[in-house]
Image (spheres, rainbow, N blue to C red):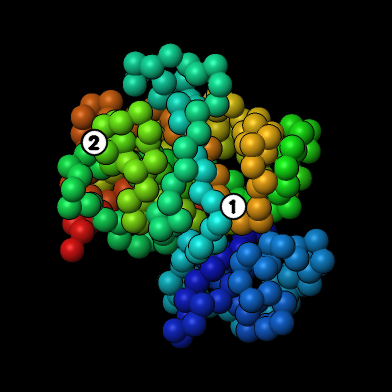
Amino acid sequence: MKLATYIKDGAQEIGTVRAERIVSLSRAAPGLAANMLELIARWVEIKDQVQHIAATATQSFALDQVQLLAPVPKPGQILAIGLNYADHIRETGAKAPAQQLWFSKAPGTAWGPYDPVQLPKVSSKVDYEVEMVAIIGRGGRHISRSDAPKAVFGFCVGNDVSARDWQLATSQWVLGKSFDSHGPFGPWITTTDEIDAHSLGIRCLVNGVLKQNSNTRHLLFNVWDQIEHLSQVMTLETGDVIYTGTPGGVGLATQSFLKPGDRVRCEIDQLGAIENVFEPEV
């Protein structure tokens, strides 16, 4: 199932997406869940009801009649792994990490899948990074690798936008990864039962030119490895957002960075696509 957060008639709603149309769960069953976080938290209890509404509802909207937001507009945590595809490691000149390399992105990076993204006043080296994004469902602490699939609610397409001059100025990446708007994801959450997360084509195009092209089977540490590792340190909460790594082809490798008006499209098979125009910060 595909689940989205969007604005319609000035109000934020949640709904299910099917065949380029969206069915409003907020209108069909107002008491079901107030937002995506509550929907995910109650999923085991309400899944059958949501599926029934999706199958029987007579009223729906075309996707171009709504404004899609980040599926989880205000995540508690946004975590991202670096150097997690072999071709990306090679292009950076780094060695394959023996341990997973993690950093956080500030909550203000969460951004709509089609909204303009800022080119900050203080950065001249803004880069794109297509990534598969995992959304935590049940979560918890000390989750085993075998139980990790149960902890993930679903997956999205994301762009781990990076201000490389800030990222590489120090040994800590957080600031370079945390500029406002630098984490668009969506366009919706595809639940885990619909896909094999580790066999999906993943691509990024800038102004229609293919820049990144790989498959999630090439993840160095796959999603279940990531969940096991992170949960040794922290409790993963419902709605937490995890960027799972980017393949080779980023602008850093050729010192080719984004300019005003550039259009970046990130695609993942079966998950959809997001597309953002990069505009100067005002």
Rounded to the nearest whole Å, what is the CA distance between mark 1 and mark 2? 27 Å
Query: What's under tag 1, amino acid-wise?
Result: Asp
- Closer to the camera, 105 or 150? 105
Give residue 1's position: percent from left, percent from top: 67, 59
Give residue 41's position: percent from left, percent from top: 72, 62
- Left or right: 278 in relation to 152: left
Which quadrant: the C terminus?
A: bottom left
Q: For the point 50% across and 33% down, which residue is it?
A: 102
Give residue 175's position: percent from left, percent from top: 34, 43
Count of picture labels: 2
SS class, disc 2: helix
Residue 77 numbered mark, or none? none
Query: What's under tag 2, amino acid-wise?
Result: Asp
Task: Decide: few, some or many residues near mark 1? Use Cα within 10 Å; few <14, some 14-19, many ≥20.
Answer: many
Q: For the point 38% across and 17% down, which residue is it?
A: 94
Label 1 or label 2, whichever comes before in sequence order: 2
Q: Label 2, on which residue?
A: 165
Q: Is residue 259 above or below residue 48?
A: above
- Left or right: 10 in relation to 47: left
Q: Is residue 261 above or below residue 250?
A: below
Residue 46 shows in this picture: yes
- Left or right: 12 in relation to 195: left
Residue 55 shows in this picture: no
SS class, disc 1: loop
Quarter of the rendering containing residue 198: top right
Q: Label 1, on which residue?
A: 240
Task: Decide: few, some or many residues near mark 2? Use Cα within 10 Å; few <14, some 14-19, many ≥20.
Answer: some
Q: Is residue 128 above or below residue 277?
A: above
Q: For the point 67% across and 46% down, which residue is it?
A: 235
Q: Are marks 1 and 2 in contact (CB under 8 Å)?
A: no
Q: For the point 55% across and 56% down, which residue is it?
A: 76
